[in-house]
Image (cartoon, helix red, strand yellow):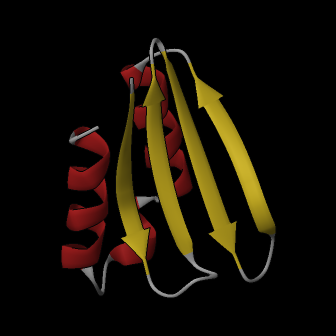
């Protein structure tokens, strides 16, 4: 069974989804700058470590609410 989670979506080119496929976690990131990137994780802690590196808290100092909502979406996976 595949469970799909939407982390964020700004438009059809800037979005991120996570699919839990058994013991694998597949993250798809689509951006207008880089195209589509796919990352596969074996555990939730590995996913959270990647998310904290990808979305550093320092970059969201002026918009902490957006950072909190993104991290909450990752924790909900």
Quarter of the figure that contains the C terminus: top left
64 lies left or right of 12: left
* Residue shown at 45% from the left, 85% from the top: 10
Split into 4 quadrants, where in the image is the N terminus? Answer: top left
The location of residue 37, given as percent across then percent down, is: 74, 53
Q: Position of residue 26 (x, y in %)?
A: 57, 35
x then y, percent, for residue 24: 52, 19
Residue occupying the point 35% across, 49% down = 5
Residue farthest toward the front in the current orientation of the protein: 1
For residue 22, side relative to residue 50 (left or right): left
Asked which quadrant contains residue 7, the reply is bottom left
> Going 22% across and 65% down the picture, which residue do you hit?
69
x and y percentages locating residue 46 in the rendered image:
48, 24
Residue that appears at 40% across and 35% down: 48
Identify whether 34 is placed above or below 41: below
Going by the image, does 53 lie left or right of 71?
right
Vertical position of residue 69 compared to residue 5: above or below? below
- In the foreground, 58 or 20: 20
Residue lying farthest to the right in this orientation: 34
């Amino acid at each position: 069974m595949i469970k799909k989670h939407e982390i964020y979506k700004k438009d059809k080119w800037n979005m991120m989804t996570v699919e839990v496929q058994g013991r694998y976690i597949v993250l798809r990131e689509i951006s207008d700058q880089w195209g589509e990137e796919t990352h596969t994780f074996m555990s939730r802690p590995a996913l959270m470590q990647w998310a904290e590196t990808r979305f550093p808290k320092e970059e969201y100092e002026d918009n902490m609410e957006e950072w909190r909502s993104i991290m909450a979406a990752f924790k909900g996976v």
